[in-house]
Image (cartoon, rainbow, N blue to C red):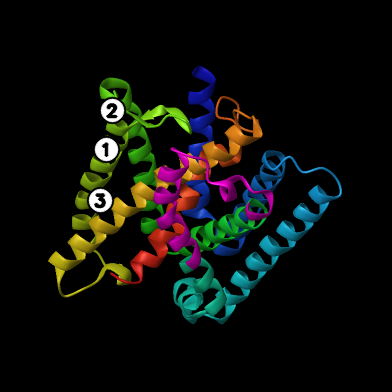
Amino acid sequence: MKQRIITGTIAGIIALLAILFLPTFAFAWVVFAIAIVGLFEWSRLLKLAMPAKAVYLVVGGITLLLVTVTMLMGVKESVDGLLVVYIQKHPLFYGLLAFMAIFWLFMPFILSIHARRPVAFLVNREFLFVASILTLAALMVTLVTLQQSVILLLYLILLVIIADSGAYFVGRKLGKHKLAPTISPGKSVEGAVGGIVLGILYAFVAVLWLSGGENPILMTANKTLLIVNFVSLSALVVIVSISGDLFESVVKRHAGMKDSGNILPGHGGILDRIDALTAAAPLFFVGLTFI
């Protein structure tokens, strides 16, 4: 536990400093590096042998590199160097985020079926080959874009952390009914509900504060509608973040691994720390465009 706390504190401080102080170009390459580590961890989970592993890493690496370079070109082409409008109008980027948002919206239903009887495609190697690359690419686009609206990026990250922590502590205290015993025996229905409720409360307080500022994404004449939409979106994001965690648990269980890696002492791998955020990020970004 001590090692876990130390690692988490150091990683959290480094992440916060990067988000707050790195320029977009530097931040994009930091996110790219994290995604590459995630790619290597995925290759372990997929149990790929050579030459399939090399093909996966090359295809995934080139894809993530192209995404990064294209985003940075978008910074130069955008008005005032802001990415959000560029991403929203770019058919490939926005299409990717919309596709992944829909993918994660359906995941709770797919996982509920998988908990009763195995859904074969969830652990299909070809499916995971593509899905893993797309999820990392979508996460990269969301993080880099929202860093320019830093308060929204911090809000998203804190939302996921609060929901996850709430689920953990409520589950430990009140958990009696298993959420998905065949997938992740430690998670309870009570914990999930607790995480969702805490996420909603946090969203309500946050939107009251954010709507009083000058963030153009949250500026509207109808404040009541904004609050309802923002809190509803946040609740969906929390539910999807739980699904992201469970999805990785399915893959790890199939691979016979407890953690995706060991790069973070006490925490496991990069994927173990970003699984919930990976699912939450594209839905949050796409949802903001409808608020």
User: In the displayed structure, would residue 78 be above or below residue 5?
Assistant: below
The residue at 29%/58% (across/down) is 233
Compare residues 188 and 145 and report the one nearer the observer. Answer: 188
Q: Earlier in the sequence, mark 2 or mark 3?
A: 2
User: In the displayed structure, would residue 255 be above or below residue 113?
Assistant: above
The residue at 38%/59% (across/down) is 284
Query: Under tag 2, what secondary structure?
Result: helix
Q: Quadrant of the C terminus?
A: bottom left
Left or right? Give the position of 95 relative to 70.
left
Badge 2 local density, few (<14 within 10 Å), some, or many (20+)? some
User: Where residue 158 appears, x then y in whole percent?
Assistant: 37, 45
Which residue type carries mark 2? Val
Which residue type carries mark 1? Val
Residue 138: quarter of image: bottom right
User: In the displayed structure, would residue 198 be above or below residue 23?
Assistant: above
Badge 3 local density, few (<14 within 10 Å), some, or many (20+)? many
User: In the displayed structure, would residue 140 be above or below residue 240?
Assistant: below
Which residue bears the numbered disc 3? 203
The residue at 25%/51% (across/down) is 203
User: Where residue 275 appears, x then y in whole percent?
Assistant: 51, 44
